[in-house]
Image (spheres, rainbow, N blue to C red):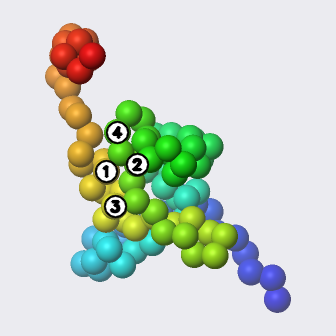
Amino acid sequence: MPTKTQDPSDILANAMAKYRDGLDPRLIELPEAAVFPHLIPAQPTTARKARCTGTLLGKPAPRFIKRGRSIRYRLKDVLDWLADADDYGSTAEVAVAGRLLS
């Protein structure tokens, strides 16, 4: 009997419900299609390149798990990656930060 493939947004919604119910985010694994671009604003091709280079959107890429041919991301690693993002109050702050980094 063939199994129906779940929509990535449904997988993500189910994982977030488990997280809100108290399941440890280190135990929640998400397929690449549920993370990119649903949680992290990048295309899956960018994610594949980031796994080779170790850099995603200018900072260290989130850790991943390889299970056979499948790539999975722990919810905790994705949430930590998102929480580590630089935040700005204006585009002027971004310009100043860019000048300081270069």
Distance of mark 3 from mark 1, alpha carbons? 6 Å
Badge 1 is on which residue? 81
Residue that mark 3 sits on? 77
| Residue depth check, mark 4 versus mark 3: number of the one nearer the observer | 4
* Residue occupying the point 40% across, 67% down: 74
| Circle nearer the N terminus (1, 4) | 4
Do callouts 3 and 1 mark residues in contact (Cβ within 8 Å)? yes
Q: Which residue reaches farthest bottom? A: 1
What residue would you read off at disc 2?
A: 61
Cα–Cα span, label 4 and label 3: 14 Å
Point 57% across, 65% down: residue: 71
Tag 2 near tag 1, CB within 8 Å? yes
Please tell me whether mark 3 sits on a helix, a strand or a loop.
helix
Q: Are marks 3 and 2 in contact (CB under 8 Å)?
A: no
The residue nearer to you, when weighing 30 against 55, is 55
Q: Which of the image's four quarters has the N terminus?
A: bottom right
How far from the left and from the top, in percent, is residue 97? Answer: 20, 19
Dot placed on the residue nearer the N-terminal end, 4 or 3: 4
Query: Is 55 located above or below residue 26 in the figure?
Result: above
- Chain-order first, disc 2 or disc 1: 2
CA distance for labels 2 and 1: 8 Å
* Residue type pointed to by label 4: Lys
Q: Residues within 10 Å of mark 2 (few under 14, many from 20)?
A: some
Identity of the residue drawn at 39% across and 54% down? 62
**What residue appears at the point 55 percent right and 59 percent down from the top-left corner?**
32
Q: Which residue is mark 4?
A: 59
Determine whether, in the image, residue 36 is placed left or right of residue 28.
Answer: right
Front tag of 2 and 1: 2
Q: Nearer the viewer, mark 3 or mark 2?
A: 2
